[in-house]
Amino acid sequence: MTVLPVRLPGGLILRSAHSRDRDAFAHLQSYAHQDADGKPNAAVGAWSAELFDRAHPTMELADITVVEDPAADALVSGLTLVPQIWSYAGIPFGVGRLELVATRAGYRRRGLIGRQFDVLHERSAARGHLVQVITDLMFFHQEHGYHAVLTQRAGRGGWARDLPPAPPAGERVELRPATPADAPFLQSVDRHAGSRALVTCPRDRALWEYELTGRSRANMMRDDIFVIRQGAQPVGYAVSGYGGIPSFPIPSWLPGQPCPESVTSISGLEVTPDASWPEILPSVVRRMTGTDGYMLWLGTDHPAYHPLGDLLVRRPPNIGWFIRIPDLAAFLRHIAPVLEKRLIESAFCGYTGMLRLHFYTFGVLLRFQEGKLAGADPWPEHARRASDASMPVAMFLALLFGHADLPELAPAYPDHRLQTRRAAALLTALFPKLPSQIWPVV
């Protein structure tokens, strides 16, 4: 594991952040993520500063790396690791989220971000994380082993004027701001909602309390969380914001249909198991929508979409997570109970045999014994013609995370090959297409 600080060419120093870096780090981030008009992004600056000011439930200052130029007395690059726990069909696994990527103009194209990626990848692995994730990595993602294989942000929306009118007796529900005392209730509703999704980011009580009290209103990542009440009974929660942006401009998505300059973004909406979506949803949206339009950022599929039906005419393009799994065999061993359950529910119940997976530069060998995963190991002698299936690793990761099925992925990866008859059937049984809903901790 790299020992910091490290001296870099040009007299630069790569090191962990100190408390005294607060203002310089916030300044670096606000300028690197400046608005379209060239003004520093104050919301990003506040987010960055508050990582130093407020106790984050999962990260510490050592999870922030910076590159310092002593000659200029300035921080010129920075990167942040946010440890998280995600869940795959109920099985928790450690995740390291990389965020706040910034390099000052004049210091770019020197590999500074790459060096920090290496350091934080090592730190993430030392914490036991099986996966690293990032958003908006853009053009250099594959250089660091990341692939866009899971939806990060997807939604549907419409116009407030098209919602059904409020009942004559008044709205069916009320909203009140959530408080730390509501954390156990929020946690229970979130747990119920997570049962619908393949991959989630569950929150314990400490994380819910952080969502409610850990960020100022100036912070880009601050959202407003409300408890939904029906009478005196709490029946769910709603989150107003798009990663802290309460009113987010949406690009045009349907020809001939103009988009309002902004819409109300609802990035979380869940109810208790005994609550009625058709009865609650219109009232919640009416109460939360203060502009002409609204967006429900609730993933590719969600119960809230169905009661509104064809009123949801807005469907902007999905945004993806970039995901890195440095040891794919280890991750498959970790989720073995899920794979075994899927076999039991398929035509391969009690299957004994192998599944040889070839990813061009490496291979993985899965061994099954009477329906149990007896082994998932690197396949040193991997070869295309000796495999059951040969494909780019990005294609397999999309299958693994339920993002798409084989027929959907095949046109995008014409270089894949199913070498044996059982390959397609086994891959379909082991890795069905399923929705995920990830509201990550930052």
Image (cartoon, grey):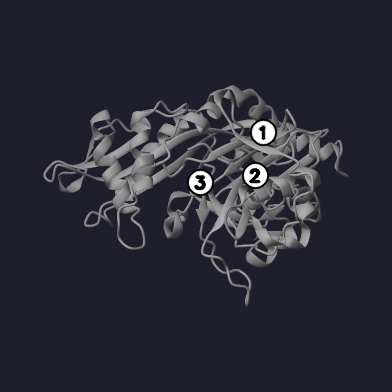
Type of amino acid under label 2 = Gln
Taking the spot 65% from the left edge, 44% from the top edge, the residue there is 437
Disc 1 is placed on an element classified as helix
SS under mark 3: loop
| For residue 420, side relative to residue 320 (left or right) | right
- Front-most of residues 266 and 429: 266
Q: Quadrant of residue 13?
A: top left
To which quarter of the image does residue 5 belong?
top left
Residue at the image position 53 percent from the left and 53 percent from the top: 147
- The structure residue drawn at horizontal position 65% and vertical position 63%, both measured from the top left corner, is 314
Q: Is residue 262 visible?
A: yes
The residue wearing badge 3 is: 243
Query: Do callouts 1 and 3 mark residues in contact (Cβ within 8 Å)?
Result: no
Which residue is most to the left? 71
Q: Amino acid at mark 1?
A: Asp
Q: Amino acid at mark 3?
A: Gly
Marker disc for residue 190: 1
Where is residue 118, by image quadrant? top left
Residue at mark 2: 437
Judged by depth in the image, the label closer to the viewer, 3 or 2, is 3
Q: Residues within 10 Å of mark 3 (few under 14, many from 20)?
A: some
**Residue 367 location, x and y as percent?**
72, 37
